[in-house]
Amino acid sequence: MARQRPRRPLPPQARADYALAVPVPPGTPATPESGARVNQVMDFLPPPLLDHHSRPVLHGELGLGRFERLLADGTTGAAAGAGRGGSGGGAGWFDSAAGLAVLRWCPPLLGLDPHCAPARYLARRRELGSYAARRMLLRGSGIAELLVDTTAAAAGEAAAVDGGEPVTVAELAAALPGRARELVPLDELAAQVGATSGSVPAQLRNLETALETAARSAAGFVCDAAPLLWHPDATGPPDRAEVVRAASAALAGRGGPATSALAHHLLRGALRTGRPVQLRCGDPAPLAGLLRTTAGEGTVVLVPDGDRRHLRTAAELAARHSHVHTDAGTDPAVALAAAPFGRVLFSTRAALLPELHVVRARAFERGLRALLGEWVADGACTPGAARRIAERVLGGNAREVYRRQPAGGAVTTTARHRHAVPGGERSAADG
Protein backbone atom coordinates (compact mmCIF):
# COMPACT_ATOMS: atom_id res chain seq x y z
CA MET A 1 0.00 0.00 0.00
CA ALA A 2 1.46 3.32 -1.07
CA ARG A 3 2.35 5.74 1.65
CA GLN A 4 0.23 8.89 1.68
CA ARG A 5 2.18 12.10 1.49
CA PRO A 6 1.58 14.30 4.53
CA ARG A 7 -0.63 17.27 3.77
CA ARG A 8 0.98 20.64 4.05
CA PRO A 9 -1.05 23.11 6.12
CA LEU A 10 -2.90 25.69 4.08
CA PRO A 11 -1.60 29.25 4.31
CA PRO A 12 -3.91 31.71 6.13
CA GLN A 13 -5.29 33.21 2.91
CA ALA A 14 -6.14 29.80 1.48
CA ARG A 15 -7.79 28.78 4.75
CA ALA A 16 -9.95 31.91 4.54
CA ASP A 17 -10.90 31.06 0.94
CA TYR A 18 -11.75 27.51 1.97
CA ALA A 19 -13.94 28.73 4.81
CA LEU A 20 -15.70 31.10 2.46
CA ALA A 21 -16.53 28.22 0.14
CA VAL A 22 -18.56 26.35 2.79
CA PRO A 23 -22.01 26.28 1.21
CA VAL A 24 -25.23 27.37 2.84
CA PRO A 25 -28.24 26.27 0.75
CA PRO A 26 -30.37 29.14 -0.59
CA GLY A 27 -33.45 29.76 1.49
CA THR A 28 -31.93 28.26 4.63
CA PRO A 29 -33.71 29.90 7.61
CA ALA A 30 -31.55 32.11 9.79
CA THR A 31 -30.36 30.29 12.90
CA PRO A 32 -27.61 31.03 15.43
CA GLU A 33 -25.51 28.39 13.68
CA SER A 34 -26.02 29.80 10.17
CA GLY A 35 -25.44 33.33 11.46
CA ALA A 36 -22.18 32.21 13.05
CA ARG A 37 -21.13 30.64 9.76
CA VAL A 38 -21.83 33.85 7.86
CA ASN A 39 -19.77 35.80 10.37
CA GLN A 40 -17.00 33.20 10.21
CA VAL A 41 -16.68 33.27 6.45
CA MET A 42 -16.35 37.07 6.39
CA ASP A 43 -13.79 37.41 9.16
CA PHE A 44 -11.20 38.48 6.60
CA LEU A 45 -12.60 42.03 6.27
CA PRO A 46 -9.46 44.15 6.10
CA PRO A 47 -8.57 47.05 8.29
CA PRO A 48 -7.60 49.81 7.98
CA LEU A 49 -10.63 51.84 6.96
CA LEU A 50 -10.81 55.22 5.24
CA ASP A 51 -13.75 57.29 6.50
CA HIS A 52 -14.43 59.71 3.67
CA HIS A 53 -16.87 61.98 5.51
CA SER A 54 -16.72 62.75 9.21
CA ARG A 55 -16.82 65.84 11.40
CA PRO A 56 -14.65 67.10 14.23
CA VAL A 57 -15.00 65.77 17.75
CA LEU A 58 -14.91 68.04 20.77
CA HIS A 59 -12.23 68.80 23.33
CA GLY A 60 -12.83 68.49 27.05
CA GLU A 61 -13.76 66.21 29.89
CA LEU A 62 -17.30 64.89 29.90
CA GLY A 63 -19.73 64.28 32.72
CA LEU A 64 -22.83 62.13 32.28
CA GLY A 65 -25.18 64.96 31.29
CA ARG A 66 -22.84 66.49 28.73
CA PHE A 67 -21.87 63.14 27.22
CA GLU A 68 -25.52 62.19 26.75
CA ARG A 69 -26.30 65.57 25.16
CA LEU A 70 -23.47 65.09 22.68
CA LEU A 71 -24.54 61.50 22.04
CA ALA A 72 -28.06 62.71 21.34
CA ASP A 73 -26.85 65.48 19.01
CA GLY A 74 -24.45 63.19 17.18
CA THR A 75 -27.05 60.46 16.78
CA THR A 76 -30.10 62.52 15.80
CA GLY A 77 -28.22 64.82 13.43
CA ALA A 78 -28.35 68.02 15.45
CA ALA A 79 -24.61 68.40 15.01
CA ALA A 80 -25.14 68.39 11.28
CA GLY A 81 -27.70 71.14 11.47
CA ALA A 82 -30.82 68.99 11.46
CA GLY A 83 -31.91 70.03 14.92
CA ARG A 84 -30.70 70.84 18.39
CA GLY A 85 -30.21 68.47 21.24
CA GLY A 86 -29.93 71.55 23.43
CA SER A 87 -30.34 71.59 27.15
CA GLY A 88 -31.73 68.37 28.55
CA GLY A 89 -32.20 66.84 25.08
CA GLY A 90 -29.73 64.05 25.84
CA ALA A 91 -31.19 62.87 29.15
CA GLY A 92 -31.30 59.08 29.26
CA TRP A 93 -29.37 58.53 26.03
CA PHE A 94 -27.21 55.80 27.50
CA ASP A 95 -30.51 53.88 27.69
CA SER A 96 -30.92 53.81 23.90
CA ALA A 97 -29.66 51.77 20.96
CA ALA A 98 -26.83 54.27 20.49
CA GLY A 99 -25.96 54.09 24.20
CA LEU A 100 -25.92 50.29 24.17
CA ALA A 101 -23.61 50.32 21.14
CA VAL A 102 -21.23 52.69 22.92
CA LEU A 103 -21.19 50.47 26.01
CA ARG A 104 -20.67 47.35 23.90
CA TRP A 105 -17.76 48.47 21.75
CA CYS A 106 -15.99 51.35 23.53
CA PRO A 107 -15.17 50.22 27.11
CA PRO A 108 -12.81 47.43 25.93
CA LEU A 109 -10.81 50.02 23.99
CA LEU A 110 -10.22 51.85 27.28
CA GLY A 111 -9.41 48.72 29.29
CA LEU A 112 -12.88 48.01 30.71
CA ASP A 113 -15.40 45.22 30.29
CA PRO A 114 -18.18 45.61 27.71
CA HIS A 115 -21.45 46.99 29.08
CA CYS A 116 -19.89 48.41 32.21
CA ALA A 117 -21.87 51.08 34.03
CA PRO A 118 -21.97 54.45 32.21
CA ALA A 119 -20.54 56.17 35.29
CA ARG A 120 -17.59 53.73 35.32
CA TYR A 121 -16.97 54.28 31.63
CA LEU A 122 -16.98 58.07 31.94
CA ALA A 123 -14.77 57.91 35.03
CA ARG A 124 -12.23 55.89 33.03
CA ARG A 125 -12.47 58.40 30.21
CA ARG A 126 -11.70 61.27 32.59
CA GLU A 127 -8.93 59.26 34.24
CA LEU A 128 -7.19 58.83 30.88
CA GLY A 129 -7.75 62.42 29.82
CA SER A 130 -9.39 63.77 26.68
CA TYR A 131 -6.34 63.35 24.43
CA ALA A 132 -5.49 59.77 25.46
CA ALA A 133 -9.12 58.60 25.38
CA ARG A 134 -9.65 60.14 21.93
CA ARG A 135 -6.50 58.46 20.63
CA MET A 136 -7.40 55.04 22.05
CA LEU A 137 -10.94 55.18 20.70
CA LEU A 138 -10.03 56.35 17.21
CA ARG A 139 -7.18 53.88 16.88
CA GLY A 140 -9.41 51.11 18.18
CA SER A 141 -12.14 51.94 15.66
CA GLY A 142 -10.19 50.40 12.78
CA ILE A 143 -10.20 53.73 10.94
CA ALA A 144 -6.75 54.68 9.68
CA GLU A 145 -7.65 57.82 7.73
CA LEU A 146 -10.31 60.51 8.09
CA LEU A 147 -11.57 63.12 5.68
CA VAL A 148 -13.07 65.86 7.84
CA ASP A 149 -15.86 68.26 6.91
CA THR A 150 -14.89 71.35 8.90
CA THR A 151 -18.08 73.32 8.24
CA ALA A 152 -18.56 75.52 11.29
CA ALA A 153 -22.25 74.66 11.84
CA ALA A 154 -21.48 70.94 11.74
CA ALA A 155 -19.49 70.90 14.97
CA GLY A 156 -20.52 74.30 16.24
CA GLU A 157 -24.12 73.84 17.40
CA ALA A 158 -23.41 71.47 20.25
CA ALA A 159 -20.14 73.30 20.97
CA ALA A 160 -22.09 76.53 21.45
CA VAL A 161 -24.44 74.81 23.90
CA ASP A 162 -21.78 72.97 25.86
CA GLY A 163 -18.88 75.40 25.63
CA GLY A 164 -16.64 72.86 23.88
CA GLU A 165 -14.30 73.50 21.00
CA PRO A 166 -13.79 71.13 18.06
CA VAL A 167 -10.38 69.56 17.72
CA THR A 168 -8.35 70.56 14.67
CA VAL A 169 -7.67 68.32 11.71
CA ALA A 170 -4.04 68.09 12.83
CA GLU A 171 -5.15 66.90 16.29
CA LEU A 172 -7.31 64.23 14.70
CA ALA A 173 -4.35 63.15 12.55
CA ALA A 174 -2.23 62.76 15.68
CA ALA A 175 -4.81 60.31 17.09
CA LEU A 176 -4.85 58.08 14.00
CA PRO A 177 -2.44 55.48 12.66
CA GLY A 178 -2.78 57.17 9.26
CA ARG A 179 -3.70 60.77 8.59
CA ALA A 180 -6.61 63.19 8.59
CA ARG A 181 -7.28 65.62 5.76
CA GLU A 182 -9.71 68.47 5.39
CA LEU A 183 -12.77 68.85 3.21
CA VAL A 184 -12.96 72.60 2.64
CA PRO A 185 -16.50 74.08 2.85
CA LEU A 186 -17.06 76.16 -0.30
CA ASP A 187 -19.52 78.56 1.33
CA GLU A 188 -17.09 79.44 4.12
CA LEU A 189 -14.26 79.84 1.66
CA ALA A 190 -16.42 82.25 -0.37
CA ALA A 191 -17.39 84.21 2.76
CA GLN A 192 -13.76 84.62 3.77
CA VAL A 193 -12.77 85.77 0.30
CA GLY A 194 -15.71 88.19 0.17
CA ALA A 195 -14.64 89.74 3.47
CA THR A 196 -11.20 90.57 2.02
CA SER A 197 -12.32 91.72 -1.43
CA GLY A 198 -13.56 95.23 -2.03
CA SER A 199 -15.07 94.77 -5.48
CA VAL A 200 -16.72 92.10 -7.60
CA PRO A 201 -13.75 91.72 -10.01
CA ALA A 202 -11.36 91.34 -7.08
CA GLN A 203 -13.72 88.87 -5.38
CA LEU A 204 -13.91 86.63 -8.45
CA ARG A 205 -10.14 86.71 -8.96
CA ASN A 206 -9.52 85.96 -5.30
CA LEU A 207 -12.00 83.07 -5.36
CA GLU A 208 -10.11 81.42 -8.20
CA THR A 209 -6.80 81.81 -6.39
CA ALA A 210 -8.28 80.62 -3.09
CA LEU A 211 -9.64 77.44 -4.70
CA GLU A 212 -6.25 76.67 -6.23
CA THR A 213 -4.51 77.31 -2.91
CA ALA A 214 -6.93 75.10 -0.96
CA ALA A 215 -6.61 72.29 -3.50
CA ARG A 216 -2.88 71.99 -2.80
CA SER A 217 -3.46 70.66 0.70
CA ALA A 218 -7.11 69.68 1.19
CA ALA A 219 -8.56 66.29 0.30
CA GLY A 220 -11.46 67.94 -1.48
CA PHE A 221 -14.31 70.39 -1.14
CA VAL A 222 -17.78 70.10 0.35
CA CYS A 223 -20.98 72.11 0.03
CA ASP A 224 -24.72 71.93 0.51
CA ALA A 225 -26.60 71.14 -2.67
CA ALA A 226 -29.63 73.29 -1.81
CA PRO A 227 -28.19 76.65 -3.05
CA LEU A 228 -27.40 75.02 -6.40
CA LEU A 229 -31.09 74.22 -6.85
CA TRP A 230 -32.22 77.81 -6.24
CA HIS A 231 -30.96 78.83 -9.67
CA PRO A 232 -33.63 78.88 -12.42
CA ASP A 233 -31.42 76.67 -14.58
CA ALA A 234 -29.85 74.28 -12.09
CA THR A 235 -28.14 72.25 -14.82
CA GLY A 236 -25.74 74.31 -16.90
CA PRO A 237 -23.10 76.79 -15.75
CA PRO A 238 -24.39 80.36 -15.26
CA ASP A 239 -23.21 83.01 -17.67
CA ARG A 240 -20.74 85.70 -16.63
CA ALA A 241 -23.39 88.36 -16.07
CA GLU A 242 -25.29 86.10 -13.65
CA VAL A 243 -22.12 85.35 -11.71
CA VAL A 244 -21.27 89.06 -11.44
CA ARG A 245 -24.77 89.88 -10.15
CA ALA A 246 -24.59 87.03 -7.63
CA ALA A 247 -21.14 88.12 -6.44
CA SER A 248 -22.40 91.67 -6.05
CA ALA A 249 -25.35 90.40 -3.96
CA ALA A 250 -22.95 88.38 -1.78
CA LEU A 251 -20.72 91.43 -1.22
CA ALA A 252 -23.82 93.40 -0.21
CA GLY A 253 -24.63 90.77 2.40
CA ARG A 254 -27.62 89.28 0.60
CA GLY A 255 -28.03 85.52 0.44
CA GLY A 256 -30.56 83.02 -0.80
CA PRO A 257 -31.49 82.66 -4.47
CA ALA A 258 -29.73 85.94 -5.35
CA THR A 259 -26.38 84.21 -4.86
CA SER A 260 -27.16 80.81 -6.38
CA ALA A 261 -25.21 81.59 -9.56
CA LEU A 262 -22.14 82.18 -7.38
CA ALA A 263 -22.65 78.74 -5.79
CA HIS A 264 -22.60 77.19 -9.28
CA HIS A 265 -19.49 79.19 -10.16
CA LEU A 266 -17.77 77.93 -6.99
CA LEU A 267 -18.73 74.31 -7.67
CA ARG A 268 -17.33 74.32 -11.17
CA GLY A 269 -14.22 76.20 -10.09
CA ALA A 270 -13.61 73.60 -7.38
CA LEU A 271 -14.07 70.75 -9.88
CA ARG A 272 -11.52 72.36 -12.20
CA THR A 273 -8.85 72.10 -9.49
CA GLY A 274 -8.99 68.32 -9.82
CA ARG A 275 -10.19 67.79 -6.27
CA PRO A 276 -13.48 65.93 -5.64
CA VAL A 277 -16.49 67.92 -4.43
CA GLN A 278 -18.88 66.37 -1.93
CA LEU A 279 -22.51 67.48 -2.22
CA ARG A 280 -24.52 67.16 1.00
CA CYS A 281 -28.15 66.69 0.05
CA GLY A 282 -31.51 65.30 1.02
CA ASP A 283 -33.15 63.77 -2.03
CA PRO A 284 -30.48 63.86 -4.76
CA ALA A 285 -32.98 63.34 -7.59
CA PRO A 286 -33.22 67.11 -8.42
CA LEU A 287 -29.44 67.10 -8.99
CA ALA A 288 -29.70 64.74 -11.96
CA GLY A 289 -29.47 67.52 -14.55
CA LEU A 290 -26.53 69.18 -12.83
CA LEU A 291 -24.67 65.89 -12.59
CA ARG A 292 -25.22 65.29 -16.28
CA THR A 293 -23.69 68.64 -17.24
CA THR A 294 -20.66 68.30 -14.93
CA ALA A 295 -19.47 65.14 -16.69
CA GLY A 296 -15.86 65.62 -17.72
CA GLU A 297 -15.30 68.52 -15.29
CA GLY A 298 -14.32 66.55 -12.18
CA THR A 299 -15.48 64.09 -9.54
CA VAL A 300 -18.67 64.58 -7.53
CA VAL A 301 -19.43 62.57 -4.38
CA LEU A 302 -23.03 62.53 -3.20
CA VAL A 303 -23.60 62.51 0.56
CA PRO A 304 -27.37 62.17 0.99
CA ASP A 305 -29.13 62.09 4.34
CA GLY A 306 -29.88 58.75 5.95
CA ASP A 307 -33.22 58.17 4.21
CA ARG A 308 -32.98 54.81 2.41
CA ARG A 309 -34.85 56.19 -0.61
CA HIS A 310 -32.33 59.00 -0.96
CA LEU A 311 -29.41 56.61 -0.59
CA ARG A 312 -30.92 54.43 -3.30
CA THR A 313 -31.39 57.41 -5.62
CA ALA A 314 -27.80 58.52 -5.02
CA ALA A 315 -26.58 55.03 -5.92
CA GLU A 316 -28.66 55.08 -9.10
CA LEU A 317 -27.15 58.43 -10.09
CA ALA A 318 -23.67 57.04 -9.44
CA ALA A 319 -24.55 54.10 -11.68
CA ARG A 320 -25.65 56.50 -14.42
CA HIS A 321 -22.64 58.85 -14.36
CA SER A 322 -19.06 57.62 -14.26
CA HIS A 323 -17.80 60.79 -12.52
CA VAL A 324 -20.30 60.44 -9.66
CA HIS A 325 -19.67 58.43 -6.49
CA THR A 326 -21.96 57.95 -3.51
CA ASP A 327 -21.74 57.57 0.22
CA ALA A 328 -22.75 54.08 1.35
CA GLY A 329 -24.92 55.23 4.26
CA THR A 330 -25.44 52.96 7.23
CA ASP A 331 -26.70 49.92 5.31
CA PRO A 332 -24.28 48.85 2.57
CA ALA A 333 -26.96 46.68 0.93
CA VAL A 334 -28.84 49.76 -0.33
CA ALA A 335 -26.00 51.32 -2.31
CA LEU A 336 -24.38 48.06 -3.42
CA ALA A 337 -27.69 46.90 -4.91
CA ALA A 338 -27.82 49.84 -7.32
CA ALA A 339 -24.32 51.24 -7.95
CA PRO A 340 -21.12 49.70 -9.30
CA PHE A 341 -19.05 48.57 -6.36
CA GLY A 342 -16.24 50.92 -7.33
CA ARG A 343 -18.41 54.00 -6.78
CA VAL A 344 -19.54 53.35 -3.19
CA LEU A 345 -17.59 54.95 -0.32
CA PHE A 346 -17.70 54.17 3.39
CA SER A 347 -18.16 56.92 5.95
CA THR A 348 -19.25 57.21 9.56
CA ARG A 349 -20.52 60.83 9.36
CA ALA A 350 -19.58 60.83 13.04
CA ALA A 351 -19.35 64.11 14.93
CA LEU A 352 -18.72 65.41 18.44
CA LEU A 353 -17.72 62.11 20.10
CA PRO A 354 -15.00 59.65 18.99
CA GLU A 355 -17.28 56.91 20.33
CA LEU A 356 -19.52 57.48 17.31
CA HIS A 357 -16.63 56.72 14.97
CA VAL A 358 -16.20 53.41 16.79
CA VAL A 359 -19.83 52.27 16.83
CA ARG A 360 -20.58 53.32 13.26
CA ALA A 361 -17.46 51.67 11.89
CA ARG A 362 -18.38 48.48 13.77
CA ALA A 363 -21.98 48.59 12.54
CA PHE A 364 -20.97 49.12 8.92
CA GLU A 365 -18.36 46.35 9.01
CA ARG A 366 -20.86 43.93 10.52
CA GLY A 367 -23.48 44.85 7.92
CA LEU A 368 -21.01 44.42 5.08
CA ARG A 369 -19.75 41.13 6.54
CA ALA A 370 -23.29 39.76 6.74
CA LEU A 371 -24.19 40.94 3.22
CA LEU A 372 -21.10 39.57 1.49
CA GLY A 373 -21.21 36.41 3.56
CA GLU A 374 -24.73 35.76 2.30
CA TRP A 375 -23.64 36.42 -1.29
CA VAL A 376 -20.78 33.95 -0.98
CA ALA A 377 -22.90 31.33 0.77
CA ASP A 378 -25.59 31.70 -1.89
CA GLY A 379 -23.08 31.39 -4.72
CA ALA A 380 -23.69 34.95 -5.91
CA CYS A 381 -19.95 35.72 -5.82
CA THR A 382 -16.66 34.05 -5.06
CA PRO A 383 -14.66 34.54 -1.89
CA GLY A 384 -12.05 36.50 -3.84
CA ALA A 385 -14.70 38.80 -5.30
CA ALA A 386 -16.20 39.37 -1.84
CA ARG A 387 -12.77 40.30 -0.54
CA ARG A 388 -12.22 42.78 -3.37
CA ILE A 389 -15.63 44.38 -2.82
CA ALA A 390 -14.93 44.78 0.91
CA GLU A 391 -11.49 46.26 0.29
CA ARG A 392 -12.85 48.76 -2.21
CA VAL A 393 -15.86 49.94 -0.22
CA LEU A 394 -14.00 50.19 3.09
CA GLY A 395 -11.22 52.35 1.73
CA GLY A 396 -9.90 51.44 -1.71
CA ASN A 397 -12.47 53.47 -3.60
CA ALA A 398 -11.90 56.55 -1.46
CA ARG A 399 -8.14 56.25 -1.87
CA GLU A 400 -8.63 56.31 -5.64
CA VAL A 401 -11.10 59.20 -5.60
CA TYR A 402 -8.89 61.30 -3.30
CA ARG A 403 -5.63 59.88 -4.68
CA ARG A 404 -3.85 63.18 -5.33
CA GLN A 405 -1.36 63.83 -2.55
CA PRO A 406 -1.22 67.24 -0.87
CA ALA A 407 1.87 69.25 -1.64
CA GLY A 408 4.61 68.28 0.82
CA GLY A 409 2.32 65.69 2.45
CA ALA A 410 1.20 68.20 5.07
CA VAL A 411 -2.06 67.99 6.96
CA THR A 412 -4.37 70.93 6.45
CA THR A 413 -5.02 72.88 9.63
CA THR A 414 -7.59 75.62 9.45
CA ALA A 415 -8.71 78.42 11.63
CA ARG A 416 -11.84 79.06 9.60
CA HIS A 417 -10.07 78.86 6.79
CA ARG A 418 -6.54 79.79 5.84
CA HIS A 419 -6.96 79.19 2.15
CA ALA A 420 -7.67 82.59 0.65
CA VAL A 421 -5.01 84.90 -0.72
CA PRO A 422 -3.29 86.48 2.31
CA GLY A 423 -4.88 89.86 2.79
CA GLY A 424 -7.04 89.34 -0.26
CA GLU A 425 -6.63 91.12 -3.57
CA ARG A 426 -8.08 94.56 -4.00
CA SER A 427 -8.29 96.37 -7.27
CA ALA A 428 -6.97 99.89 -7.72
CA ALA A 429 -10.55 101.11 -7.59
CA ASP A 430 -10.94 99.57 -4.14
CA GLY A 431 -8.64 102.14 -2.64
Image: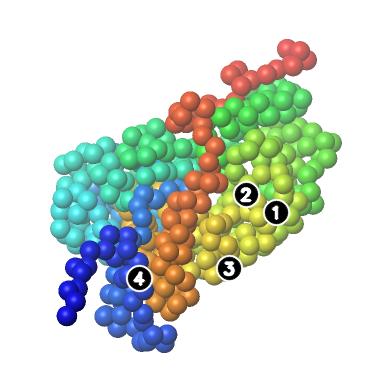
C-alpha separation, residue under disc 2 versus residue under disc 1:
8 Å
Return the residue at label 1: 291
Question: x and y percent of residue 21 in the render?
Answer: 36, 74
Q: Which residue is mark 4?
A: 20
Label 1 – label 4 distance at C-alpha: 39 Å
From the top left corner, tell me how far across and down residue 196 is, in percent: 63, 23
Tell me the residue that label 3 is attached to: 338
Mark 3 or mark 4: which comes first in sequence? 4
Q: Secondary structure at mark 1?
A: helix
**From the viewer's perspective, is 167 left or right of 315?**
left
Q: Is residue 348 above or below residue 34?
A: above
| Mark 2 residue type | Val
Q: Nearer the viewer, residue 331 or 24?
A: 24
Q: How is the image coloured?
A: rainbow
Label 4: how many residues lie within 10 Å, few (<14), some (14-19) or many (20+)?
many
The residue under the point 35% across, 66% down is 17
Q: Horizontal and vertical percent for residue 29? A: 36, 87
Q: Secondary structure at mark 4?
A: helix
Question: CA separation, marks 3 and 4?
Answer: 24 Å
